[in-house]
Amino acid sequence: MVENNAVKFSEVEPAYTSRHGCRLVWRGVDEDDSDTVILNKDELDSLVDILQRDSTGTVVLEDQTSTILVNSDVTQFSLQGHKLLEADTLKLQKQVLEYGKIPHEPQYVYISSKQFYPSVWIRGEGGEKKGDTRQPGDSLGGQAAKQSLLHAILHSKPKKTDLPLPESDVFRIFATRRSTRKFAKTKVEDWKIDKILAAADTAPTAGNFQGLKIFYIKNGKTKEALVEAANKQSYVNAPVVLVFCMDPSRVKLKFPEDILEKFSIQDATLAASHALIAAAGLGLSSIWIGMINEEKVKSILGTRLRPSSILCIGYPDKRKPPKSRRKLKELIEVIE
Ligand SMILES: Cc1cc2nc3c(=O)[nH]c(=O)nc-3n(C[C@H](O)[C@H](O)[C@H](O)COP(=O)(O)O)c2cc1C
């Protein structure tokens, strides 16, 4: 059998956490099955060398224990503490050599929108004017001026730096965050939970009226009941469970009820998003649960407040790379 279990070797992508090298991606039927091996420049060069010569051989990875064994039919990735990954050698050869042909600019570590992994693909794509050396903030006339924001996002010339971003850098957290549905049994430290709750409290709210309430569920039976109320999603029974509810009655603004309701949905959602980012910054992971039966959740919590989401947090059973997004260019529409 060439491919391991449910996952199949799929493609080679630029590395985004190191300046050189690449990511080899395996995909499964379920998006959570995907697996990635990140190679640094030397490892990639050694692999290219073997594949280019149409020969067999072994690449010993940085940790001196993990290996890539290139056979004529199957290439095996024996990574320390990881299940064996396999790839069809011909497919791997084609992909890796093609990847090697394109001059991939090193992915410098810098603070810019391009740092976000999903937008890495913006580089060198159609529509980018070759030789366009304008800098963001340069004075642009007429139509071009209206596009300056998009220009800044898509064409910014980042300052190249070898300095690593600190672990807690918010851009690094955005770029590396990934939802988790399998949590380790490790207990989440109380101080981390405090920080997550405090982070949720820093979120902006309509008129600063804080039209929300957070239920912090410690009780195991309540967590199990919430699994039922969340379409039987078993991972809702997580180490830390927070239910974000809307409380429009707190929003003392003279607007129609439907607007206050809308404000409170946004308040609760933003607070949950702050908590999600804070959890990632603390080395934890989370899963956002929107598929809930509101009436059941209300009855479990004994509240009249409508729940907007449940955020389940814990240490991930396994760290995974972030998922891809559509191209940033497709996300943004410029209205002229
Ligand atoms: C509004 C919303 C509702 C979601 N509801 C669920 C859910 O009920 N169950 C679930 O497993 N994941 C749910 N998710 C998580 C998404 O599937 C996940 O964020 C998405 O696949 C992107 O993956 P990432 O967070 O790793 O980037 C939800 C996310 C959002 C923002």
Image: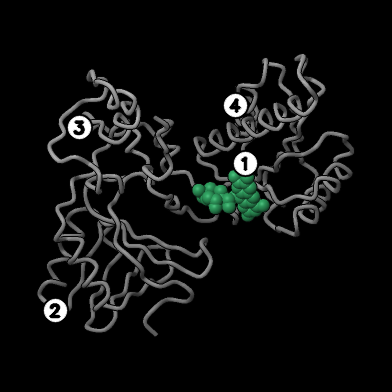
Residue 273: where, in percent of width, then height?
59, 35
Looking at the image, is mark 1 or mark 2 nearer the viewer? Answer: 2
Amino acid on which disc 3 is placed: Lys
Spatial CA distance of label 1 from label 2 is 48 Å
* Residue at numbered disc 3: 160
* Circle 3: element type: loop
Labels 3 and 1: the sequence-earlier one: 3
* Residue at numbered disc 2: 55
* Circle 4: element type: helix
Labels 1 and 2: the sequence-earlier one: 2
Labels 4 and 1: the sequence-earlier one: 1
Residue in the image at 25% along x and 60% along y? 61
Q: Is residue 174 left or right of residue 64?
A: right
Q: Eyeballing the image, is 15 above or below 216?
A: below
Spatial CA distance of label 4 from label 1 is 16 Å
Q: Are marks 2 and 3 in contact (CB under 8 Å)?
A: no
Residue 324: where, in percent of width, then height?
42, 52
Amino acid on which disc 4 is placed: Ala
Q: Is residue 186 visible?
A: no
Q: Which mark is residue 199?
A: 4
Q: Eyeballing the image, is 57 above or below 23?
A: below
Task: State which quarter of the image contains the N terminus.
Answer: bottom left
* Circle 1: element type: loop
Give the class, few, some or many, for how many residues have Cα within 10 Å of label 4's Cα (few <14, many ≥20): some
Q: Which mark is residue 53?
A: none
* Residue at numbered disc 1: 188
